Image (tube, helix red, strand yellow):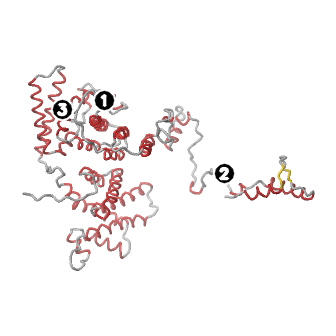
Amino acid sequence: MAAPRQKRVVGWLNRSEWERVYHGLYSNEVRKQQQAIQRVAVWKNRMLHRLPVAVECTAALVEACLDHKAAVQKGPHLPNHTKFQHNFAMALIRFVNLMTENNQNKQYAQPVHILAEELAIPQWLVELRHESSHTSMPSLNLLKSGAKLALNWLKREYWEPQNLQDSSDSEDNTCDPTIEDKFKDLVYAFQQEQFRLLSEFKQPSKADKKELQSILDDLEKNALGQRNKAISWLCEEGYFISTSEQLDALGICVEDFITADNLDIPHELLTFWKPVLKRLHHLQMTVSLAQYLLGQVTDESSLRNKLLTGWVFAIIMANSGLQSDVVLYRTPCSLPWKDMLDMCIETPSKWMLMLIHVILEYLKPALAPRQVEHLLYLTLVYQSQQRQPFSSKVSEDVGQLAVHKLGDIVGSAKTEEEGPGQLKEEHSIWKLCTEPIDWAEIPIGVLPSQHFEYDYLQLPDDVTCGMSKEINREESKTCDSVITENGLDWTAEEMQQIQQEICIF
């Protein structure tokens, strides 16, 4: 009998979040890498010194690579070559030191290179760490190569072994391919039977119901042993993520579905998959299904992303008691609202922003009103629909205000001859500057052709000279008033007060 697994406190919410960060750190997309680094920072704040050093080192190395990549994309010449050398060197030094520190369990401290050899860390990385700390700084190319080697070592020695471990439901991740084939064959058999029953436009017979129930029973047994994998298989294209041909066969117009300004799954598709969704809910897999669907959404406006967010919306409605004419299940479950909200914010696509509004409505416990206001305002900023914070009292006309960007001005300049653009309709005075001007040398609020000096804040010379003449003239008459050219009577005391209050800034 296997010994019970020892429980420990971790910084991630569940296995799915850990896997999402793992794949994000080693992704080829900069956005996913940045999101993974931010999530590791959250883990570090939660756990302090208890965060696994492999996770911390991976995030530091990836962040150094991203900083360098961002600078290279701006131009071939790096503005601060030494800065990136220091970033890579610091990440490598921490990697070697932290990895070998846990093995300092002898009576006397062991040399770093001996501990690194025990951990199978390449000796070249240890030497690179020594040069960065005690001798001359290695070249940038050498440090970049060291960072890549360290990331590969971390992936091989930490991330991949951890990823192969059992998840919380003790399922075996090293699944036999025949199990996957059998599961997909059952799903395909269910689809064929459903298509046949729906195409006959009549009540199914007892034999038909019995056949369908038999398929669903087998499907439930296979899903019970492979929970996470069963969800991933169901969310592949051709199953929950229907193809255009499958939607056409159900009488659903793909174009109307994609362009609709709502997240409703068509009635025909919801009816088709209702038996499977009920079985998954019976197995308490609804929460995992919703999280997996959200984790697969990207920022593209595609049929796949519309279906992914649509199924999440259907699950939310089913668990909120506001279902359509197709009732998925009557016993709701507790959804991880805040986790789902975080996933929507991380991928702010068009349909994800719609989901944010839905989740905020049913979020328990609810956010503070000001937090909701700021979050909704962020969604409006992303959609470039209005320029002021969201409020239910704001008229609908305010929501149509456009947020002008540099791209709008460039686009309006190109299309000015073809037809009136949005900026032209609003009679904007802003024009795109095509002259080679160093804007860093121009003060804020001043145009390049404007010669501005702080002395201009003083009164003009002709006015001050006129005042002096009048003062001298009136002094001889022992009069305390001053008459300006405009006929204004100012006493000497008022003139002195005016001169004192004029400030040059």
Q: Return the disc, 3 or 1, that comes first in the chain's sequence.
A: 1
Report the amino acid beneath label 3: Pro
Residue 450, which numbered label? 2
Q: Return the disc, 2 or 3, that comes first in the chain's sequence.
A: 3
Residue 134 picture location, percent across and down:
36, 76
Residue 168 picture location, percent across and down:
18, 51
Residue 350 visible in the shown view: no
- At 28% across and 45% down in the image, what residue appears? 336
User: Within 10 Å of the Cα at label 2, are there few (<14), some (14-19), or many (20+) other Cα atoms?
Assistant: few
Residue 414 picture location, percent across and down:
51, 38
Between marks 2 and 1 in the image, the one whose residue lies nearer the viewer:
1
Between marks 2 and 3 in the image, the one whose residue lies nearer the viewer:
3
Viewer-proximal residue among 233 and 359: 359
Pointers 2 and 1 in contact (CB under 8 A)? no
Quadrant the N terminus occupies = bottom left
Q: Residue 373, located in which quarter of the rendered image?
A: top left
Q: Which residue is mark 1?
A: 254
